Image (tube, rainbow, N blue to C red):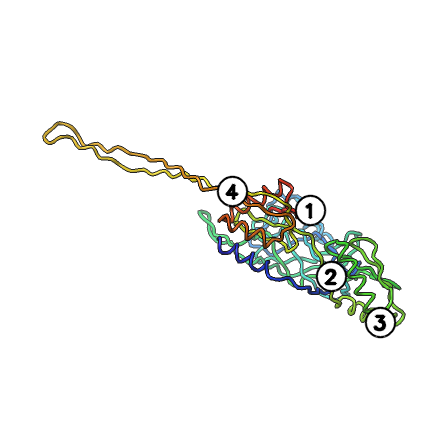
């Protein structure tokens, strides 16, 4: 584990070079996003693993469906062990057209044991506005099985949730209109990155078309030469490279002893003293033998020896403004382990000398 930690440090201590990241990796155009869809439906064809008769909403749904087909039934005489009520969810990608197929997720909401082998019946999927955007139907794939008898059963994977690849047909698209301007939204808001993005876009098009609104949103006016050629304009904007600025942060995983530090982490003047205390308990057995020909008996008695060792604590002075490389080299001089380093970093942060965010995961 210790060797792994130092490998992480060595990688981060390599000389940093300015590099660019495409705008499409750090930002997205406002309005171009997924939309959640949801629907309620029935899965039929189950082999006795559906909802029980006491599940009223399943019985009511089945009876209502049969009534729409002109079949009148008594709800009290309906058994639904081969039917399961489910909630169907899907994500509608941006710019999809009617006729496109998308994946759906089917989840049981009753007391069904398994959806294995079932088929989802015609299920409309609605958006947040209540309108129908897709229709789902098809065989459910659970990726597992349930087998056994009355005495024992064997189950693999979660059987009450399944997927239908390409199981929904898009019936309506989400309208997106680009008029004379578009908006870019940063996934991680940052004023420095926003300023650099503005300069890069204006430089690429040779005119002042980009105007930041805040650390997250930028408005871009579409140039006259790209009116009617919105796809070419958006493609050129998202392909531009810009240097990304991030906050200084130290991330610690106490479960694995992993520590990752950014290159801009700085330390104020601080003195660090660290020592280890170890307690060792040894147990041995002593045998007591009676004299020859005596009526005594051999007795075995346990013996414990406790040894306490305290490591030599050395004082390390860290000057203000040092980089992460100076800090690591200094802590290595103390011979600290990854677990010790975590405790030292937390103490430095508590002392107000660590000029970075400390995040525990």
Q: Mark 1–mark 3 contact, CB under 8 Å?
A: no
Q: Nearer the viewer, residue 328 or 297?
A: 328
Can residue 177 be seen here? The reply is: no
The CA distance from mark 1 to mark 3 is 53 Å
Write the residue at 29% across / 34% down.
Answer: 303
Residue underneath mark 4: 274
Position of residue 101 measured from the top left corner of the image (x, y, whole percent): 70, 65
Q: In the rendered view, does 110 fall on the left or right side of 98? A: left
Outermost residue toward the left? 293
Secondary element at image label 3:
loop
Tell me how far mark 4 sits from mark 3, CA to CA.
64 Å
Q: Is residue 129 left or right of residue 328?
A: right
Residue density around tag 1, few if under 14, some if 14–19, many if 20 or more, within 10 Å: few
In the image, residue 268 above or below residue 175: above
Sequence-wise, which precedes: disc 2 or disc 4? 2
Residue corresponding to mark 2: 93
Foreground: 332 or 208?
Answer: 332
Relative image position of residue 92 (x, y in whole percent): 73, 59
Residue highlighted by disc 3: 229
Q: Which residue is mark 1?
A: 60
Q: Residues within 10 Å of mark 4 (few under 14, many from 20)?
A: some
Q: Is residue 317 left or right of residue 171?
A: left
Give coordinates of residue 99: x percent, y percent.
Answer: 75, 66
Q: CA distance from mark 2 to mark 4?
A: 54 Å
Query: Marks 3 and 2, Cα distance to the nearest angstrom?
Result: 22 Å
Say few, some or many: other residues with alpha carbon within 10 Å of mark 2 (under 14 / 14 to 19 / 20 or more).
some
Residue 112 location in percent, x, y? 59, 48
Instruction: Assign a secondary structure to mark 4.
Output: strand
Query: Residue at the spot x=73%, y=66% of the render?
Result: 241
Q: Earlier in the sequence, mark 4 or mark 3?
A: 3
Element carrying mark 1 = helix
């Amino acid at each position: 584990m210790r060797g792994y930690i130092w490998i992480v440090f060595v990688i981060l201590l390599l000389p940093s070079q300015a590099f660019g990241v495409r705008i499409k990796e750090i930002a997205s155009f406002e309005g171009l996003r997924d939309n959640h869809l949801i629907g309620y439906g029935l899965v039929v064809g189950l082999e006795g693993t559906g909802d029980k008769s006491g599940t009223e909403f399943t019985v009511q749904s089945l009876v209502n469906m049969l009534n729409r087909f002109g079949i009148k039934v008594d709800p009290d005489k309906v058994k639904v062990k081969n039917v399961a009520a489910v909630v169907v969810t899907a994500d509608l990608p941006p710019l999809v057209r009617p006729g496109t197929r998308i994946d759906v997720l089917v989840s049981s909401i009753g007391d069904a044991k398994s959806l294995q082998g079932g088929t989802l019946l015609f299920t409309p999927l609605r958006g947040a506005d209540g309108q129908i955007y897709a229709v789902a139907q098809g065989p459910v794939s659970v990726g597992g099985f349930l087998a056994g008898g009355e005495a024992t059963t064997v189950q693999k994977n979660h059987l009450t949730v399944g997927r239908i690849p390409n199981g929904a047909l898009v019936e309506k698209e989400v309208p997106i209109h680009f008029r004379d301007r578009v908006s870019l939204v940063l996934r991680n808001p940052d004023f420095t990155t926003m300023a650099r993005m503005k300069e890069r876009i204006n430089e690429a098009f040779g005119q002042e078309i980009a105007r930041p609104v805040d650390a997250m949103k930028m408005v871009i006016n579409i140039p006259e030469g790209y009116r009617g050629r919105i796809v070419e304009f958006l493609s050129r904007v998202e392909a531009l490279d810009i240097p990304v600025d991030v906050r200084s942060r130290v991330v610690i995983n106490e479960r694995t002893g992993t520590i990752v530090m950014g290159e801009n982490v700085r330390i104020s003047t601080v003195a660090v003293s660290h020592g280890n205390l170890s307690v060792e308990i040894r147990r041995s057995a002593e045998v007591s033998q009676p004299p020859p020909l005596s009526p005594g008996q051999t007795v075995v008695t346990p013996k414990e020896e406790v040894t306490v060792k305290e490591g030599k604590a050395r004082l390390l002075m860290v000057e203000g403004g040092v980089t992460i490389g100076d800090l690591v080299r200094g802590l290595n001089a103390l011979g600290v382990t990854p677990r010790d380093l975590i405790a030292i970093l937390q103490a430095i942060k508590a002392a107000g000398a660590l000029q970075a965010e400390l995040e525990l995961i």
